[in-house]
């Protein structure tokens, strides 16, 4: 065994003493032949032995053997292959690399950060290359895009790609994959069109990423179209391609197509893997093809050990096919097959029992969950309550309903309606009043299903007159719902602009669409600025067609930061000073089609928020919070218009908004807040006649109620 083989045999556990003993006969030759040292280090890098490679470098230094930037680059490469990003960053600061910057070392460092899920550090390295005297090459650029892919930041990946003059298929593939991870299928296809425009041929990686993006975007026809186009591009689909296609068929309830695709795999010399079979079983489940699902499970068992996903999908198929006995048999078999049932498995089994009118079995399964450290979710409770309703077990249904409430798993309208129907069947009219009280506590509006069941129970027990009294008592709630609907009054009007009062719980787009007919005398309405779904307050709209002077005039004022907006919000945390400014750049990401923002000094866009404390309230501090803790009513003026700016800025300094389920605290002190406490109270801009236009909206009653329930203790 030669020195290199003996060195490799040490692995990452080799000590400096062992390394020195192995290399004693080699070190003298390395003085005259540095390339030999490079060969040793490169081999260790390929074997993913960064610690051993570092020991070799330390031994070289200790014996006065020259260490150069190429040697250090090899060690950085070993760190990259092992996802040791901290080691890679430390090595990039070595004297050898500082004296002789090496693009290969920096590229490896970027790759190490990417592999270690440190995408922001990877981009920082990329941006720092020119300052270190290194010109980024194609590998650097591709590694930077791949880092964005790892961080699921498709916007940055696309922006980087567009900034590169010489993007290749690897660059595009990484950007398309970044879009795929976020389900941005339209952007992925747009990048593919750009490739074709540049005459860059799409490879298998690009096609698979596009198919996965379309599948995640519920575009099953588009996914299959890409599969069928691959042979025209002289590409052979692999198992990843087929799996994406079969999964897309599941989403489109196209089990026949999924079956035909599975049947074509042998002709393409592709063997289905467990993921293929799982996708096929799920496709059968989506169409209630339980017999085919079971035969596919048996076929998968011949080649593989079915996992939790396999069995859960089969139970779901049986549940949809109303085969509760077989569903329970598979659930019992799972531990024997070394597949631990999860909540999905149990939920499907409980639903199967509910459809089979087997409330006893549903309750037995529900009772097993705590022993397995599984917490029931809304699906679990609703299926179990529905099973009790079918079994006329109204007391059990009520017990489950209150367990949900006490366990902080809020019931929904399905939970309440099932329990109410169970009470109706048993003639338990008193219990319906308890259900109504609980519904109002969790702020769920009684609907026609609840009203029908409740009044039916009252009619059977107390007669039509009492039933009508109950029904009339529900009318104010429905009337209040109408008031919260998309109807909205005009707060102010002027030349080319109208300001309306937007209620919480409706999107700007839906509100404007609903108002078009109501506001017809004012002309066509155009959105120039938005308020988030949970935010209420003043919403200015342009009166004019798309592209009109009115629309452009107002949008330009918003873009140029010439519009003054003031919000009222309630936050909680350590006491603020009377006034202040939060200046923190914000980065917005799209994850599964939902926008979220976060503070990012490196990659965020400028965001500035001014605030003033209007009133302070005494509230109890949650655990692990500072002793000085209070609620504060703030007047807030965003000087920039970033997504969720006020919410993220205040949360970032430890003062989240009351009712903020996205950026707020898990444990809140202000429990009676029914929604996000954020209201645009005032706006000022210029109309097309250069006249000052201002509009104000008072705080809605549900937010006023929150303030009235708090105890003020000093004025700010």
Image (cartoon, helix red, strand yellow):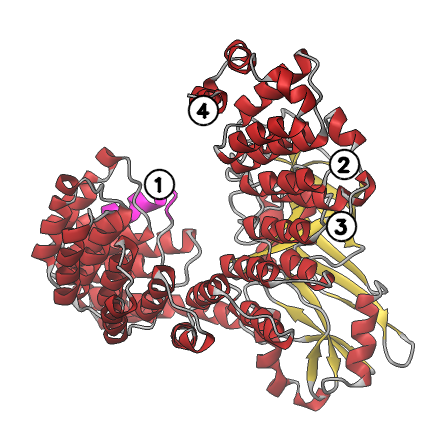
Q: x%, y% of residue 586?
A: 70, 50
The local secondary structure at tag 2 comes to: loop
Residue 242 lies in quadrant = bottom left
**What residue do we see at 67% from left, 26% from top?**
34
Q: Nearer the viewer, residue 513 or 612?
A: 513
N-term-proximal mark, 1 vs 2: 2
N-term-proximal mark, 4 vs 1: 4
Point out the image quarter for the N terminus. top left
Q: x%, y% of residue 240?
A: 37, 60
Residue 508 lies in quadrant = bottom right
Q: CA distance from mark 4 to mark 1?
A: 61 Å
Q: CA distance from mark 3 to mark 4?
A: 70 Å
Label disc, if present, on residue 101 of the rendered structure: 2
* Magenta residue span: 398-409
The residue pinned by badge 3 equals 635
Camera-near label (2 vs 4) is 4
**Number of residues whose C-alpha sits closer than 10 Å to that of mark 2, classed few (under 14), some (14–19) or many (20 or more):** many
For this view, does 601 lie left or right of residue 296?
A: right
The residue pinned by badge 1 equals 407
The residue pinned by badge 4 equals 5
| Up-down relation of residue 42 to residue 164 (above or below) | above
Q: CA distance from mark 2 to mark 4?
A: 31 Å
Q: CA distance from mark 3 to mark 1?
A: 35 Å
* SS assignment for the magenta stretch, majority: helix
Res 347 seen here: no
Residue 408 falls within the magenta-colored stretch: yes
Camera-near label (3 vs 2) is 2
Residue 134 falls within the magenta-colored stretch: no
N-term-proximal mark, 3 vs 1: 1
Q: Nearer the viewer, residue 17 or 636?
A: 17
């Amino acid at each position: 065994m030669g020195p290199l083989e003996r060195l490799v045999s040490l692995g990452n556990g080799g000590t400096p003493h062992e390394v020195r003993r192995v290399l004693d006969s080699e070190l003298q030759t390395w003085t005259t032949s540095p390339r030999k040292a490079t060969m040793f280090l490169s081999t260790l890098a390929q074997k993913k032995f960064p610690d051993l490679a570092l020991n070799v470098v330390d031994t070289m230094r200790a014996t006065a053997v020259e260490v150069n930037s190429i040697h250090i680059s090899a060690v950085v490469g070993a760190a990259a292959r092992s996802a040791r990003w901290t080691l890679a960053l430390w090595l990039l600061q070595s004297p050898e690399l500082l004296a002789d910057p090496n693009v290969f070392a920096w590229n490896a460092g970027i790759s190490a950060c990417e592999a270690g899920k440190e995408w922001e550090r990877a981009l920082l390295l990329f941006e720092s290359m020119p300052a270190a005297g290194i010109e980024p090459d194609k590998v650097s650029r591709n590694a930077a895009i791949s880092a964005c892919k790892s961080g699921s930041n498709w916007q940055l990946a696309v922006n980087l790609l567009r900034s590169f003059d010489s993007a290749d298929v690897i660059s595009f593939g990484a950007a398309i994959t970044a879009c795929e991870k976020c389900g941005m299928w339209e952007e992925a296809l747009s990048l593919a069109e750009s490739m074709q425009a540049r005459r860059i041929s799409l490879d298998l990686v690009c096609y698979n990423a596009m198919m996965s993006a379309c599948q995640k975007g519920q575009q099953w026809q588009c996914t299959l179209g890409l599969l069928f186009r691959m042979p025209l591009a002289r590409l052979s689909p692999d198992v990843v391609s087929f799996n994406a296609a079969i999964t897309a068929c599941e989403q489109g309830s196209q089990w026949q197509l999924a079956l035909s695709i599975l049947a074509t795999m042998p002709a393409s010399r592709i063997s289905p893997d467990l993921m293929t079979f799982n996708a096929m079983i799920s496709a059968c489940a989506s169409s209630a093809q339980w017999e085919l699902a079971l035969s596919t499970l048996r076929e998968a068992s011949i080649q593989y050990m079915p996992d939790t996903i396999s069995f859960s999908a089969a139970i779901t198929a049986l549940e949809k096919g109303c085969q509760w006995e077989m569903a329970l048999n598979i659930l019992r078999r799972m531990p024997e097959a070394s597949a631990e049932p999860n909540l999905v498995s149990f939920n499907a089994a409980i639903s199967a029992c509910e459809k089979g009118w087997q409330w006893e079995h549903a309750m037995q399964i529900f009772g097993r969950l705590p022993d397995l450290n599984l917490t029931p979710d809304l699906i679990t409770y609703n299926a179990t309550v529905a099973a009790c309703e079918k079994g006329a077990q109204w007391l059990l249904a009520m017990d489950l309903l209150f367990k949900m409430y006490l366990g902080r798993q809020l019931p929904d309208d399905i939970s309440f309606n099932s329990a109410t129907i169970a009470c109706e069947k048993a003639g338990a009219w008193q219990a319906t009043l308890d259900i109504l009280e609980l519904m109002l506590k969790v702020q769920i509006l009684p609907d026609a299903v609840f009203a029908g069941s409740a009044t039916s129970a009252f009619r059977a027990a107390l007669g039509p007159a009492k039933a009508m009294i109950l029904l009339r008592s529900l009318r104010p709630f429905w009337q209040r719902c109408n008031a919260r609907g998309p109807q909205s009054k005009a707060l102010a009007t002027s030349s080319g602009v109208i300001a309306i009062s937007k209620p919480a719980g409706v999107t700007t787009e839906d509100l404007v669409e609903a108002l078009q007919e109501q506001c017809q005398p004012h002309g066509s309405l155009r959105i120039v600025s938005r308020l988030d779904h949970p935010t209420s307050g003043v919403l200015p709209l342009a009166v004019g067609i798309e592209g009109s002077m009115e629309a452009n005039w107002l949008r330009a004022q918003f873009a140029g930061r010439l519009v003054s907006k003031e919000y009222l919000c309630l936050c909680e945390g350590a006491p603020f000073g009377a006034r202040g400014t939060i200046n923190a750049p914000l980065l917005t990401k799209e994850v599964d089609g939902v926008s979220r923002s976060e503070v990012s000094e490196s990659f965020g866009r400028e965001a500035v928020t001014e605030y003033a404390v209007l009133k302070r309230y005494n509230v109890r501090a949650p655990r692990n919070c500072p002793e000085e803790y209070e609620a504060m009513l703030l007047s807030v003026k965003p000087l920039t218009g970033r997504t969720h700016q006020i919410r993220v800025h205040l949360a970032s300094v430890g003062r989240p908004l009351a009712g903020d389920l996205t950026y707020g605290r898990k444990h809140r002190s202000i429990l009676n807040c029914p929604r996000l406490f954020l209201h645009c109270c005032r706006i000022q801009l210029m109309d097309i006649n250069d006249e000052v236009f201002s509009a104000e909206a008072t705080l809605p009653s549900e937010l006023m109620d929150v303030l009235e329930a708090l105890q003020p203790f000093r004025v700010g």
